[in-house]
Image (cartoon, rainbow, N blue to C red):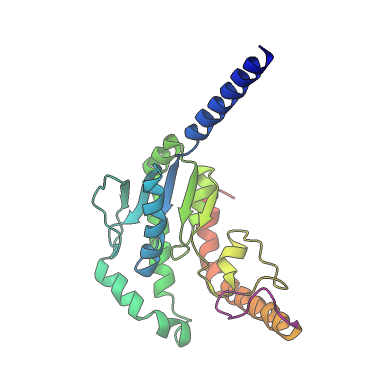
Amino acid sequence: MIACERFALCFLLLLGLDQTLLSVTAGKILIWPGEFSHWLNIKVVMDELIARGHNLTIVTHSATPSVNTAQSPGYNVDVIQVPHTKQDVFKNLEKFMKYWMYDVQHDNIIQTSLKISEELFAREDLLEKWRKEQFDVLLTDLMYMCSDLLATKLNLPFIISLRFSFGSSMERLCGQLPTPASYVPAASLSYTDQMDFPQRMKNVLFNFFQDFLFTFLMALKWDPLYTEVMGK
């Protein structure tokens, strides 16, 4: 009789554990993807999330050259109207390498990304809709900035799909990514976590230089938007 009672108890515990696991296998995920190869990168993640039964909502803009804005059985799409076109996006892409190599004093690319973010945070109706959706997490790509700000506004944790900026400056300074320079090689360097002393020194100096560029060439342009959106 005691053996039967123990068996029944174990069966009930296993049944309860199984139901608990089933109840947490799917969630609601807000995704802010990048463009071109960045979209293809995050699309692989999305396909797997859809296959596992998660509910996805994609945030993109009206000039996107990559993201399919048509409603799909696998995900919903919220489109932000912006004042530029797909052709403008392509023109900015062509200028990207030249911009970073020769014309960093100009800010066309930064201004384009800034305008998208301004239009997003101006849509209080859309932000309120997403709050009511009660998403579990924001999955994002740093090709478009302010994803950390969107997560803060919606009170959501966020996941960055890949390291994007040189030295991971944006991920470290904006996303609080824990990357101690003595152990974690900077993005764009070919080092592993097994660095010798000269490599560690180069890694530290490279991170410092990239932080300097990010702070004075980009962050100063973005700080006013952060201050306006957060009210502090």
Q: Residue at x 57, y 23 (%)?
A: 11
82 horizontally vs 140: left or right: left
Q: Inspect this view and state whether residue 39 appears.
A: yes
Q: Nearer the viewer, residue 155 or 203?
A: 203
203 horizontally vs 156: left or right: right
Where does the image place residue 144, in percent across and percent down from the top left?
43, 63
Q: Residue at x 67, y 79 (%)?
A: 203
How many numbered marks does the figure carry? 0
Where 211 sits versus 14, above or below? below
Q: Nearer the viewer, residue 38 or 128?
A: 38
123 horizontally vs 88: left or right: right
Where does the image place residue 209, in percent across and percent down from the top left?
63, 79
The magenta region covers: 186-196
Residue 4 placement: quadrant? top right
Q: What is the quadrant of the N terminus in the image?
A: top right
Q: Nearer the viewer, residue 43 or 108?
A: 43
